[in-house]
Amino acid sequence: MAVAAATLLCSACGRPPEVEGEAWPLTVDEPGVVGYAAMPAAPSSLLHGVAADVLGWQPEGLAQVLPVAVVHLDPTTFGGRFAVVLAVEDGTAFLDSLDRCASVEPLGSGEYQALVRRDSELARGLTALDAMLSAGSRTDQIMAALSAMGDTGPQVIDFHALVDDGLAVITPSFEARGVTSAFARRVSGLRRQAAELPAGGGGRPPEAGLIVSFDVTRGRVVYHEQIKHAVDGLRTLVVGAQGAGLGMLLNDSLGDRDGASVDRPELPEISWDTVQALMEMADLGSVRAVQLSVRLDTAALADLQTTTPEVSGFVMRIDQDPTSPVGRLMASAAPAPRVPEALGVGRAEPDPFARALADFMLPLAESEHGRGGPARASIESLHELLLPWAGVITVLPWSGSGLVAAPLRDPSAVDPPALLAWFEPLLAGTGISLEGRIDSTADGRWQGLDDAGEPVLTAGVHDDVLWIGPGDIRDPPRALLESASASARGPMPGSGPALMLVDDLVQVLLEVSGDGEWQLDVHWEPDLLER
């Protein structure tokens, strides 16, 4: 991992040619590349600080703002875990400054040997991380990290540096040079000129200040043992906690402090079967790649001692097997209409969605009813309950919270009590217990009651709209319900997000681009969150 610390310090020169392709792709075709982390507009002062901390080096030739990427390689193939690619304005000046660095010795043919400063907290941290990633079990990972952090002796590392048409390619071995250079040519975001880079600062932060992309399919191969140990450890933790009463343990841990009583909800007990069902529903095995782009004002990184970078959101981009339950659920999504005054709106093709959601819920049904006929019957009943839905759902402002409104294709076929009963186990997991009591009222509403007989949820049908809200709702907002109904019947957009949630602080958008890829975009204004 110390290789990563040293390679993070290197760069090159020149005017790169135009390169077609995505600026920051989800995955790349180059073999052995597990993922990468990138800053499209890194301030040079940040890299100067890292160079001084790790090697006592003052690099020259850096642009004031430059793109940089740390490439995650398969260490069994390339002899090291990380390589670095970044751009500078004057590669000759940069390489000369590297040759003059007292802790770096040029060995010829692009190979260098460096003495890493052991008093560098960054270098020790990176070395500990590399040791943890190389270890198997959780115990081995902890011991490896502690050993690496406690090692205060000198550390000599070898690395290779290649200047290729305005980019520096810094690798842990000669074998890694070719694949890292190919990565640099493919990722066009690395070849953006300084004039094209977002300035940040007083304006809106760059759309992506930090990007982390991981090829999950390749990662499962590289980290097979670590993943297995992590799952086994989770199972041991849950089963052990279940035996002791997880809810009781957590409730006790949040109990009285210094003689003062702490208000807290009573947490439900949890079983390994429930955890396993939730893991199956998450369907992590069908995820092929994931990318997180953080909206970060990178200009503030220029001086971390006096400024704190503002984060204003993130984009989570997922590539998932389209034939998986989650993949089919996402494939049913469709661009949502705009609904006036709504806090949120979502849309899907109703028939494919009903089938996909029912199949998605199968692990939960099996945890409740066991595998086989009863669970399948429960899933088929959910499928029938969802079929009256017209494909649009909205969240309307109501009494300080929200009211869910779902226009219906056939209002006579909807069964609110059965819907509430089916989702009762999920509600119980969130602390909303209906105690199995769902009563109808004289005016045609349905209410889920707690153990004291108080309404927790109320549902009803207004014309062709099913509505559900918290507490005892006697007079729902009819004008808003009619607006939701009209929006569901009107012309639908041909593109755009399938889900939109907006309030005064946060905006959430879900977009599905097809063939298993979808993204969740969350944005907020930092100054509003601080109020």
Image (spheres, rainbow, N blue to C red):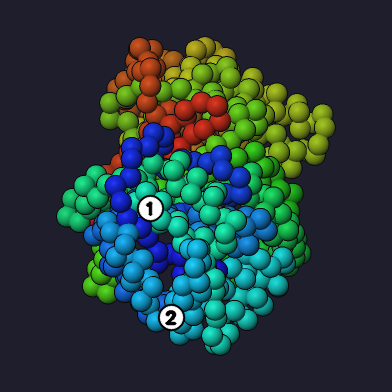
Specify the label residue 490 is tagged with. none
Q: Residue furthest front?
A: 108
Decide which of 119, 524 is in the foreground and name it. Answer: 119
In which quadrant of the rendered view does residue 63 lie? bottom left
Residue at (62%, 71%) from the top-left corner?
A: 131
Q: Amino acid at mark 1?
A: Leu
Residue at (51%, 51%) from the top-left corner?
A: 180
Tell me if 342 is positioned left or right of 293 in this view: left
Look at mark 2 in the image and give the residue it sits on.
103
Q: Amino acid at mark 2?
A: Ser
In which quadrant of the rendered view does residue 86 lie? bottom left
Image location (x, y in percent) of residue 173: 57, 62
Decide which of 511, 501 is in the foreground and name it. Answer: 511
Element class at badge 1: strand
Residue at (43%, 80%) from the top-left corner?
A: 103
In which quadrant of the rendered view does residue 283 lie? top right
Q: Is residue 154 visible?
A: yes
Image location (x, y in percent) of residue 146: 61, 80
Tell me if 270 is positioned left or right of 264 in this view: right
Element class at badge 2: loop
- Asked if residue 418 is positioned above or below residue 202 in the image, the reply reads above
Q: Residues within 10 Å of mark 2 (few under 14, many from 20)?
A: some
Look at mark 1 in the image and give the residue it sits on.
167
- Asked if residue 129 is positioned above or below residue 280 in the image, the reply reads below
Q: Residue furthest bottom?
A: 153
- Asked if residue 1 is positioned above or below residue 312 in the image, the reply reads below
Image location (x, y in percent) of residue 216: 60, 46
Tell me if 348 is positioned left or right of 31 in this view: left
Q: Residue furthest left?
A: 202
